[in-house]
Structures are given as C-alpha cells and as structure tokens.
Image (cartoon, rainbow, N blue to C red):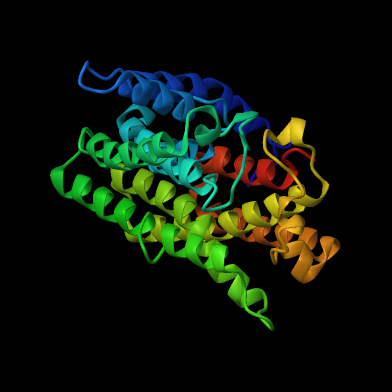
Amino acid sequence: MNSVPPCQAFVDFARTMRPEIDAALDRSTQYDKDCPAVLREAIRYSLLAPGKRLRPLLVLMAADACGCPWRTAMPAACAVEMVHCYSLVHDDLPAMDDDRLRRGRPTCHVQYDEATAILVGDALLAQAFGTLSELDCPAPNIVRCCRELAAAAGACSLVGGQVDDLAGLPPGSGLEELDRIHRRKTGAMFRVALRLGAIVGDADAAAQAALDRYSQNLGLAFQVVDDLLDVGGRTETLGKSVGKDAAQGKITYPVLLGVEASQRRATALIQEARQAIEAFGEKAAHLDALAQFVIDRDR
C-alpha cells in the first residue's frame, strides 16, 4: 500500500466528515414536544459533545472501501455513535467507572443527575435501532445491520465485557484474559462499525473477513494505546481523567506487560490491521491512515 504522510489521509477525511456526522446527529435529536426538555437537553449534551467520532467514521470508511456512497451509510454511522455514547454515559456512572470528566466536560450524571444519565443511555440505545431502520438499502441488509448491532451491544459483547472489566481479572490472569475483555468491550464496537459499513456496501464474504481482521487488531491496539495514555497522557489533551486505572488497581496492558512491551504490541497489532486491508488497495487509504492515527494519537 502506498505510503502517505502519517495520519494525513484520515485527518483530512475526518475533518470533512465530522461536520456531516454532527449535523446528522443534530437532526436526529430534534425531538417533538413529548420528549421532556431536560431529557432532550441531556441527550444532546452527551451525543453532540466534541469527539473524534472514530466509530461512525469507521462505518463510512468501510462503506467507501466497498464502493458505497458515504451518505447511504450515514444512518448506520449515527446508530453506532448512539450506542457508543449510551455506553459511555452508563460507564461513567458512580456504580460503574465513576468518572466525572468526559470529552473535556463534566459527565452526564455530574451535569444533570444519575437518573437522567441512566435514561439518556436508555433513550440512545433504543433510538439507535430506529435510526438503522432509516437505511436506504434492501430490507434483508437492514435486518442484518440490526442483528449485528444488537449482538455487539449485548450480553456477550459490550455489556459482558463491561461486567468482566468491573469485576477485574482474577489473580494469575494473563494476556489472553485481558484481551478477551477488550475484544468485547472496545473491539466489538470497532468490529460492528466496519461490519455495518460492509453490509450497507453489499460487500462479499472476502471483503467482510478482511474488515473483520482489521477491526479486531485495530480495536485491541486502540485499547492498548488508551491504557498507555492513562499512564502517560494529559487530562487537558485527552478530555478525560488520567491515572484512574492505577488508582483503582486495574490490570491494564502496561501493568501486565510493561510500558515498552505494550508499545511494541500496539505497533504489531496496527501492522496486522494494515496488512488485513491490503487487498482493497487505494480504496482503503482512509482505513490505513486511521490505523496510523491510532498508534500516534495524543502522544
């Protein structure tokens, strides 16, 4: 695959597409009078908060790589962001990770209250599937998208990973156990984002398998880098608290492997992700650049 300036293709694509994603999310939250004002405000506060929009961008980039216009895939991109936002709002709650800062602003339960934050998450999860129903593609593809997103957000993936993450790894656990948590908690949403883009793009089995391999490696690399940033990042740069993992005694990749070995593993995972999409050629330039962005982000 031709080399490009580090991250530049992704940065350029993201700069163009984020306003489109934000506009679509804005339109989706113009509720009628039956939605209580405080709920509408809290949903928009959480969903429209400044962010990288990596997961919806993955949907659009996968669709693009499969020859589908990005506008066709936009409802799927919004649906993935809604599920992601719901999970963040709930994960930040005192009963879960108990975070007070998200995307550079007070978390939803701090800005409003715990009950409102719970209901924000409930509303976003429900709305995600309503948004998927708006896809302009064959009905069987819409059904597949709904099934894939439900599985990714469910008990065996995102929610199950969060349960195990909250419980913590038992003594003697190793890399396999830690990977298992994050393949579900972080990796599942990366994987479904790419799968939705591929489904909307009517990709064949080989293309979907390649995107799956890319997503699995990218998702784990993203979590390894996230753990490294919790050790060496800055709150003002990341927009969230740092050092919480160590304070809570959590087993993370730097704790398990050490910082240097974690950095090497992230680099190896990104290399595997890039190799997985070589068959797409220049159609995957944005995905390739995103992989570079993940390994370089906020360092």
Residue 64 visible to an observer of this rendering = no
Name above or below for residue 250 compared with residue 293. Answer: below
Name the spot of residue 242 as percent of width and height, x first.
Answer: 74, 44
Quarter holding residue 251? bottom right
Q: Residue furthest left?
A: 139
At 19% from the left and 50% from the top, the residue drawn is 143
Name the spot of residue 292 as percent of width and height, x first.
Answer: 68, 44
At 16% from the left and 49% from the top, the residue drawn is 140
Is 112 positioned to the left or the right of 198 in the image?
right
Quadrant, the C terminus: top right
At 45% from the left and 29% from the top, the residue drawn is 47
At 20% from the left and 38% from the top, the residue drawn is 133
Name the spot of residue 73 as percent of width and height, x first.
Answer: 33, 34
Name above or below for residue 176 compared with residue 206. Answer: below
Is 74 positioned to the left or the right of 167 in the image?
left
Number of labels in the image equals: 0
Name above or below for residue 33 compared with residue 45. Answer: above
Q: Residue furthest right?
A: 260
Residue 38 visible to an observer of this rendering = yes
Camera-nearest residue between 295 and 173 = 173
Is 104 positioned to the left or the right of 180 in the image?
right
Name above or below for residue 1 compared with residue 276. Answer: above
Quarter holding residue 22? top left
Name the spot of residue 24 as percent of width and height, x first.
Answer: 37, 22
Camera-nearest residue between 226 and 201 = 226
Quarter holding residue 253? bottom right
